[in-house]
Image: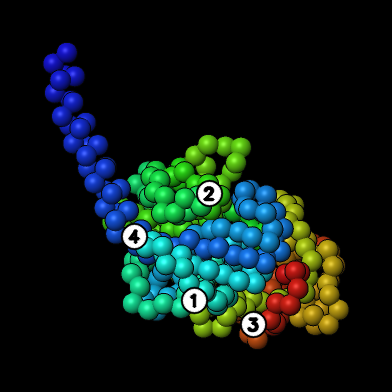
Amino acid sequence: MQSTIDETPADGALLDAYSRAVTGVASTVSPSVVKIDVHGASRAPAGRRAEPDPGEGVGSGFVFTPDGYVMTNSHVVHGAKTIRVTFQNGESVHADLVGDDPETDVAVVKAWERDLPVVTLGDSASLQVGQLVVAIGNPLGFQCTVTAGVVSALGRSLRSKTGRLIDDVVQTDAALNPGNSGGPLVTSAGQVIGVNTAMIPAAQGICFAIAINTAKFVAGRLLRDGKITRGFIGVAGQTVPLVRKLVRHHALETEGGVLVVSVEGGSPAARSGVRDGDIIVRFAGEPVRGIDDLHRMLTDERVGTVTELTVLRGVHKLDLAITPEVKRRSAA
């Protein structure tokens, strides 16, 4: 009985500290969180994400520059004809789409206001499993709703609407609902470390956020170019396991690769000598374990640059020189 009495004040102090952390984050970050209303969009159902009917939608976002640039999800604003941003004080203004990237589900819009409160962007690489995080957004239209939880897992991959894997996704049990999409996931220090993006309706406490390090890179390119440029080599492929004897014989670093199902005529792959049936195992000096690895490596930095591509052709290993172009269709 004595131990129970001794523990109670400590438990109360911990709860008070937790409460102070959450309320501190809410008061610091909420003024920078906005409600986003879109009209005229023609978005397909998002599967995991329970979004409003096509044509109208509600989401969240957060101001990251004083002159009104707002980060949100691509699936919130993609295809919208009109966008309105509503601030915590109730003021609503027109916003323009700067650019969006469906393959990472990140978008930037410009709200025509100045001297706005901004969030502090953190470093998602410093996150730890179990760390306290707070989600702020507009679930079901309820503005500036705050939920809290922990980082459940790091380094998750989430399939985007385009079919491409989004890497380094943060899993959290902070409750998300339709309308939270695009809102910030924040540490107890008030730093944004994720962009809330998805929930699994059939599960409880399994929600996801795009890591802010990914979002910062994408947002920077959208501000600079209005789009993300990715490399294209002109193959359709699928992930396949490799024969163990070939792995040992060629001292390969992976037991999987990309089987080339078809090569587009006139493409970089066709010009470099890639053939149907080849298995891609390395690109730019890095092992290729599957189609998602290859997609990830086809960055804009590779466009126009001669790059080494290693393939297995039968029992032989070949090194080919390939020059990726600007991506123009869904093939890799």
Q: Estimate the spatial distance between the alpha carbons at disc 4 and disc 2, rounded to whole Å.
A: 20 Å
Label at residue 303: 3
Name the N-terminal-most of marks 4 and 2. Answer: 4
For numbered disc 3, what is the local secondary structure?
A: loop
Q: Which residue occupies 66% across, 77% down?
A: 231
Quarter of the image that includes the N terminus: top left
Label at residue 29: 4
The amino acid beneath tag 1 is Lys
The amino acid beneath tag 3 is Val
Horizontal arrangement in the rendering, residue 233 relative to residue 139 (left or right): right
Between residue 138 and residue 22, name the one nearer to us: 138
Q: Which residue, given by chain and number where applicable, does mark 1 sit on?
A: 110
Name the N-terminal-most of marks 3 and 2. Answer: 2
Can the viewer see residue 195 in this picture? Answer: no
Horizontal arrangement in the rendering, residue 96 relative to residue 63 (left or right): right
Q: Position of residue 201 (x, y in %)?
A: 60, 41
Q: Position of residue 323 (x, y in %)?
A: 69, 83
Label at residue 140: 2
Quarter of the image that includes the C terminus: bottom right
For numbered disc 2, what is the local secondary structure?
A: helix
Label at residue 130: none
**Of the two numbered discs 3 and 1 in the rendering, the one whose residue sits closer to the viewer:** 1
Name the N-terminal-most of marks 1 and 4. Answer: 4
The vertical placement of 112 against 194, above or below, is below
Label 1 Cα crowd, 10 Å radius (few <14 / some 14-19 / many 20+): many
Image quadrant in which you'd find residue 237: bottom right
Label 3 Cα crowd, 10 Å radius (few <14 / some 14-19 / many 20+): some
Name the N-terminal-most of marks 3 and 4. Answer: 4
Name the N-terminal-most of marks 3 and 1. Answer: 1
**Of the two numbered discs 3 and 2 in the rendering, the one whose residue sits closer to the viewer:** 2
Q: Position of residue 24 (x, y in %)?
A: 26, 53
Between residue 78 and residue 194, name the one nearer to us: 78
